[in-house]
Amino acid sequence: MADSSMGTEAAEPKREEPYLYRGRTRCSPEEEARLERQHFWKIINAFKYYRTHVEESLKRCERQYLSLPRRHQQLLSGFLDKLAEIRRCMECNHQVLQAIVRNCTHMFENMEYDEDDNVRRAGPSSTFDMDKLKSTIKQFVRDWSEAGKTERDSCYMPIVEEIQKQFPPEKCDISEVKVLVPGAGLGRLAWEIACLGYSCQGNEWSFFMLFSSNFILNRCEKENAMTLYPWVHQFSNNKMSGDQTRGVTFPDVNPQSLPPDSDFSMTAGDFLEVYTDPDTWDCVATCFFIDTAHNVLEYIETIWNILKPGGVWINLGPLLYHFENMANELSIELSYEEIKDVMLKCGFQLEVERESVLTTYTENERSMLKYLYDCVFFVARKPAPLLSNSQNCKDNELKNSKSATTTT
Ligand SMILES: C[S@@+](CC[C@H](N)C(=O)[O-])C[C@H]1O[C@@H](n2cnc3c(N)ncnc32)[C@H](O)[C@@H]1O
């Protein structure tokens, strides 16, 4: 998967490792399909391996407890009961994870993943994939539980309110307004936008997220009928033992309760590869997304290209660059100041900018350790060209009257 055009200068005394661009390397279509299938089964394997992985960590806890002097064990008389409760929670998580990956081979319209016995047996998964799986479990709280409401209000509401401001239902046919949400996670933001009547598509790249959003959106109808134990892997920073083993029910709403004429869809694949048609979207809404780029300039260019003239990019999030310090991965870490400069050079007009929106991300509200993100929120317009037609002039007048930047 190496991009051999980089880092190969003969004059250099020491050849650098070539940068890798996951999922973006050109190889034969057959090889690409083979790698894709391999990756698909690797992630299914991670879902299947969860039980073995957590069982190993529990066994370690048990061994360590039993290695204590007897008087210490006696002082901690409830310890083994606590581990039994943790094991019960993990087993419940395992059951939900198995339900998520059941029948996944048929979930994509244009791709079948044949069952292959060689790769189907659950072998050990990497710590990296196990961490991703545990983060995916926490993402259920953020997107589809009552417990995640405060977090959604701080992250999604500014975006939703801005869409309503830009495309007010009383002034346009909002079913014709096309909104794209790249990096849609478990799909709640895109779903909320579609619920209001806009035509909305979420795009996601990770199979962890895609399997899980498919499960939520297509197979969970009954409100709060499912339970996950998202904090059960957190052994530190618990005030009460019960905080670790508390369950979170989902979904807080029936995901299939969208209005009958709504237009909501999810696509799978790399945002940069899926979205190449120019002048297509009225709005691109990114939430905690732009820092997932290897090269954020490519995201800015793509968003510029796919927005219709006059369309808006609404963004909220931090700049926690996902590929920073990752071996063999290209990662260009820009400050917000630099990003803004590039956006303006591309031609975007910054209409709204708030530089300090405080949010959390999959927060455990009872934990003794919490992270606070000091996010930027902005609305940037791809200006419409000035046209002679009088209606377009009126449209432009309207847009220009809104184009003064508001900074809070
Ligand atoms: C930090 S999460 C944010 C998810 C969601 N927007 C939210 O606010 O909860 C970033 C998401 O972007 C996805 N992602 C990263 N790179 C992507 C790409 N090139 N194309 C599509 N999705 C991508 C990741 O898989 C992940 O689900």
Image (spheres, rainbow, N blue to C red):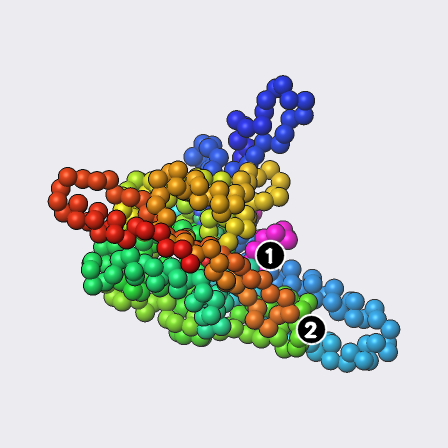
Q: Position of residue 195 (x, y in %)?
A: 31, 65
Locate the C terminus by quadrant.
Answer: bottom left
Q: Position of residue 54 (x, y in %)?
A: 65, 63
Asked if the residue at tag 2 contacts the one at tag 1, i.e. Cβ–Cβ closer than 8 Å, the answer is: no
Residue toward you, 10 or 57: 10
Q: From the image, give the main secondary structure of the stretch colored magenta.
A: helix
- Alpha-carbon neighbours of circle 1 within 10 Å: few (<14), some, or many (≥20)? few
State the SS at label 2.
Answer: helix
| Residue 99 visible (yes or no) | no
Q: Quadrant of residue 30?
A: top left
Residue drawn where x is 43% and y is 35% of the image: 29
- Amino acid beneath label 2: Leu
Q: Please report the bounds of the magenta region as a residue range.
A: 118-134
| Residue 29 visible (yes or no) | yes
Seen from this angle, which residue lies furthest top? 11
Q: Closer to the N terminus: mark 1 or mark 2?
A: 2
Q: Is residue 132 magenta?
A: yes
Q: Which residue is mark 2?
A: 83
Q: Which residue is mark 1?
A: 131
Q: Quadrant of residue 382?
A: top left
State the SS at label 1.
Answer: helix
Query: Image check: 159 left or right of 250?
Result: left
As measured in the structure, the alpha-carbon distance from the residue carrying label 1 to the one carrying label 2 is 20 Å
Q: Is residue 290 magenta?
A: no
Between label 1 and label 2, give the one nearer the viewer: 1
Q: Which mark is residue 297?
A: none
Q: Position of residue 384 (x, y in %)?
A: 25, 43
